Amino acid sequence: MSFSPGLCGAWPGAATRFVALRLLPDEDLRAGIEAAFAAAPEPEGFVAAAAGSLGRARLRLAGCDGAAEVAGPLEIVALSGTPSPDGPHLHLAVAGADGAVTGGHLLAGCAVRTTAELVLGFGAGIAFARVPEAQTGRRELVIRPDDRAR
């Protein structure tokens, strides 16, 4: 299978650095992830694992442009995505006390309730950028070899 330039990239597993991070009550989940990647020598990567709880969630639901507010308490049941210097693309699924699950794009304003335990993967040798794409009307991921001096 062949991919257009910018749509596929690889780096050796040995070039991935993993960091475990715990966020405290009232810290913002998205801001914590963004801060971790902004402070790292490798500003690209992925969310490898997440567990914890939120007091509330703010999500952009599929096909919508505005924010949906989800009242807590909530458990984080899934979190994935690709942070980059141009901003993250993160998806979050949360479950309420009744077990109902809601998911969408993670927005600022998701306050940690008791804890958020994250494992983040930082990739050396790869560069992520988000550029406007005519087909979707959004800034989408472009993947390139990393030529930045570190």
Image (cartoon, rainbow, N blue to C red):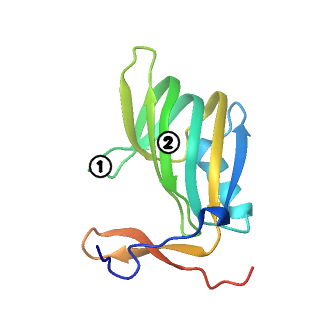
Camera-side residue: 91 or 9? Answer: 9
Looking at the figure, which quarter contains the C terminus? bottom right
66 left or right of 56 in image: left
> Furthest-top residue in view?
98
- The amino acid sitting under disc 2 is Leu
> Which amino acid lies under the numbered mark 1 shown in the image of this protein?
Cys
Q: Residue 25 sits in which quadrant?
A: top right
Task: Give coordinates of residue 53: x percent, y percent.
Answer: 58, 27
Question: Which label was assigned to residue 64?
Answer: 1
Up the image or down, 100 lies above or below 116; here it is: above
* Residue appearing at x 58%, y 38% in the figure: 50
Tell me how far mark 2 sits from mark 1, CA to CA.
19 Å
| Residue 73 appears left or right of 142 | right
Give residue 79's mark. 2
How many numbered markers are drawn?
2
Q: Residue at x 55, y 38 (%)?
A: 110
Q: Nearer the viewer, mark 2 or mark 1?
A: 2
Return the mark for residue 114. Answer: none
